[in-house]
Image: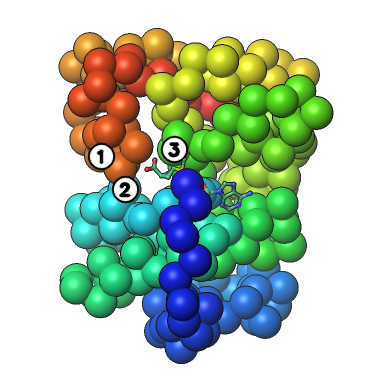
Amino acid sequence: MRLRNITGSREVIAESPYVVPEAELFDCPGTWNNIFGNNQPIRIEIGMGKGKFIHTMAKEHPEINYIGIEKYSSVLLRAIQKMEAEELPNLKFIRMDAEDIAKVFGPGEVDRIYLNFSDPWPKDRHAKRRLPSKEFLARYDVILKKDGILEFKTDNRDLFDFAVEELEPAGWKAQVITYDLHSDAALMEGNVMTEYEEKFSSMGNPICKYIICR
Ligand code: SAM
């Protein structure tokens, strides 16, 4: 998702109390519970887009701390606007490329990772940029606690098949795999729709999901 460049979005982000300053990110490993001021588990969404999913999750689960990560300022701005309309103490944002994720969280500091409708990067030479690739799984392996899980949803079947193939060589295994999430009543319990999920499921696209662990 790339919105047109919104003038002043970088300035708004730099001043927002909801965003952890970029200059401080590499000092953060091991300190996230201090940043929230409590000992609640920390769950992150990588590539949160406009933040509907993570804002709803944080609202529904005040006993969990959430961090939304987004690469583009113009997109993050929309998530900040949601927080301005409804402030939540257990939600923070980071503007960064997730390639550096293992420099921002300490070993085992994250309780759960969400990837929702990640960019497909369809060219083979860009496979390493896909958020469920084995290169990214190796980074998640560092920051995710030992018994932590990663949940991934997408309507892109090619990307999902790629993601499933990456698991074994990367040392991960699937607890759950579905190729039609919205037809599975048990898995739909507590499902929070993302912006893309609403859009693509309303077009009739089946939604794939896996839940993985090591
Ligand atoms: N998760 C949202 C949803 O389901 O509605 C947005 C999906 S959108 C297709 C993917 C988002 O991931 C975009 O906003 C994009 O900027 C962000 N993204 C892609 N690669 C990223 C990366 N390496 N680090 C951080 N964000 C990234």
Q: Residue at x 57, y 58 (%)?
A: 71
**Numbered disc 2: secondary structure:** helix
Q: How much space separates mark 3 and mark 1, taking CA atoms?
A: 11 Å
Q: Which mark is residue 53?
A: 2
* Residue 179: percent from left, percent from top: 40, 11
Instruction: Please name the residue that numbered disc 3 is placed on.
Output: 116
Asked if the residues shown at circle 2 and circle 1 are in contact, with their CB atoms under 8 angstroms apart, the answer is: yes
Q: Determine if residue 206 is in view.
A: yes
Asked if the residues shown at circle 3 and circle 2 are in contact, with their CB atoms under 8 angstroms apart, the answer is: yes
Task: For label 1, count other residues whose C-alpha is less than 10 Å away and answer few (under 14), some (14-19) or many (20+).
Answer: some
* Residue 91: percent from left, percent from top: 36, 66
Q: Earlier in the sequence, mark 3 or mark 1?
A: 3
Q: Residue at x 45, y 34 (%)?
A: 117
Outermost residue, right direction?
A: 125
In this image, 61 relative to 90: left or right? Answer: left
* Residue 68: percent from left, percent from top: 45, 58
Question: Taking 62 as reference, is 189 above or below it?
Answer: above
Q: Residue at x 30, y 43 (%)?
A: 195
In this image, 78 relative to 172: left or right? Answer: left
Instruction: Please name the residue that numbered disc 1 is placed on.
Output: 192
Amino acid residing under circle 3:
Asn
Amino acid residing under circle 2:
Phe
Ligand 1 within 8 A of label 2's CB? yes
